[in-house]
Image: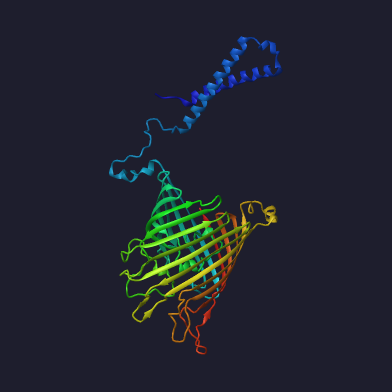
Amino acid sequence: MNCNYDLIAKKHKEEFMRRLAIIGALSVCLLGGAPLAAMADEKTEKALEERIQKLEKMVEVLTKHEAAEAKVKVTKEGEKPLSVATTGSGKLIYAKPFVSAPKATLGGYMDFEANFLTDQQLTRSRATNFDQARFIPFIYGDVTDRIKVAAEIEFEHGGKDNPKAEGEIKIEFATMDYLITEPLNFRAGLLLMPVGKFNLLHDSPLNDLTDRPLVSRLIIPSTWTEAGAGFYGTLYPGRVSKLDYELYAFNGFGREAAATTIGVGDGLRKARGFQKTDNNNNKGVVGRVAFSPFLGVEVAGSAARSAYDPNAEKNIALWAIDWTLQKGPFEVIGESAWARIEDNFSGATIGPAGMRGYYIQGNYHFLPDFLKKWAPTHFTDASTFTAVIRWDNIDTDTDNRTLTATGGNTRELQRLTLGLNFRPIEDTVFKFDYQFNSQLNTNNVSTSVTGESVRIDGNGFLFSVATYF
């Protein structure tokens, strides 16, 4: 049966307006527009009550009709409604459950960087450079209230077509969660390793400086992702305290061949596993426990251990602590990590046995009132400036096993960074940094006079922008 919804709605609305006018007139009478005695007889009161009831029903009918009308899709005469078929080879691409009931959310972040240094240094391959550092799409999906899927795809330094061969395309992480209860939930997939806090919160828009902390790059090899499975949850031991944990089994650290060592140049970055496969069929264990006694304070400890050689005879152990202290506009954060590498040698080539590093960072958030008055559309209640100071210190050979004939530990690096950034909103940031770097020469060049390794400084200015979308 065909219904002319517009005609029905028009008639209902006209009747509604007529009856509303009657109610208005009666209200005037009741409020003093006519003698109350004229309305006092029983028949008039009954009639008024009936009219009010009819009007209430009419309003209900109109409300339901308008809600239904919003869902009606207009189709041309003789045209069949669009539907997604699940038969026929050409239509099988639509035979997915989410096509008829979308559950996924797409987002991501990007950052652009520019550096103007006096010399290249440990984390910058060129002294001056513009770089589309990262473009990271996110995909988050709710399969049910208990089943969640999350993933990030990383396009770094322009992707694989970068002529300098520095670009890459990879899955940053991809997990499926089954929510059991707040203290106990299951997770499996490509996991962000919970060693330190930075590896879990490494997105550029979240961080207040352009470069990542050295310890979170070389000792804890962020971004560090491995295939694995395990559990996570939150407990509340006290009225205001909170305890979070993550515990997973994973494929473990890796080394491609027995005849290679883990060197000082890249720290543990080249000891990251292979994600898809286990090079020695020996699984590793990783976990983190974070305790917050009250709002604004969190201290956490984490560790990972696994065999790294193809014969599963040598192990790497990694420990870390991290902290977050917040009070009003002030914030102090940091991370410290230590690594021990067993039997890191191949023939005459000897690699480091120990590595360590830390960073400590202070932030101060502020927004001068005069800026809000001067340019209120640019400086709002959601805007903020942050003044930042950070000290980094790492040593990728604490036992000095990689000394040359003339001495000198090749991978000690200290960095002081001063920064100022502006966030027009919390999710978007413009960063201005200046770095003071001091490191041993990457080739361990020694002076002919003292026999000591020459220190080089790659000081300079960095600028970056980053935003979620």
Q: How is the image coloured?
A: rainbow
Q: Residue at x 37, y 60 (%)?
A: 250
Q: How far from the left and from the top, in percent, is residue 318?
A: 43, 67
Q: Is residue 225 left or right of residue 364?
A: left
Q: Residue at x 32, y 68 (%)?
A: 312
Can residue 259 be seen here? yes
* Residue situated in front as seen by the camera: 113 or 260: 260
Q: How far from the left and from the top, in percent, is residue 449?
A: 52, 90
Q: Is residue 399 left or right of residue 438?
A: left
Measured along the vertical axis of the image, is residue 81 above or below residue 159? above
Quadrant housing residue 14: top right
**Looking at the image, which residue sits at the far bottom?**
449
Q: Residue at x 54, y 70 (%)?
A: 392
Quadrant housing residue 207: bottom right
Measured along the vertical axis of the image, is residue 54 above or below residue 108? above
Is the N terminus in the top left, top right, bottom left or bottom right quadrant? top left
Q: Is residue 89 left or right of residue 358?
A: left
Q: How far from the left and from the top, in percent, is residue 211?
A: 52, 66
Q: How many marks?
A: 0
* Residue situated in front as seen by the camera: 230 or 279: 230
Q: How far from the left and from the top, in percent, is residue 48?
A: 60, 15
Q: Is residue 381 left or right of residue 212?
A: right
Can residue 124 be seen here? no
**Looking at the image, which residue sits at the far front?**
238
* Residue situated in front as seen by the camera: 185 or 291: 291
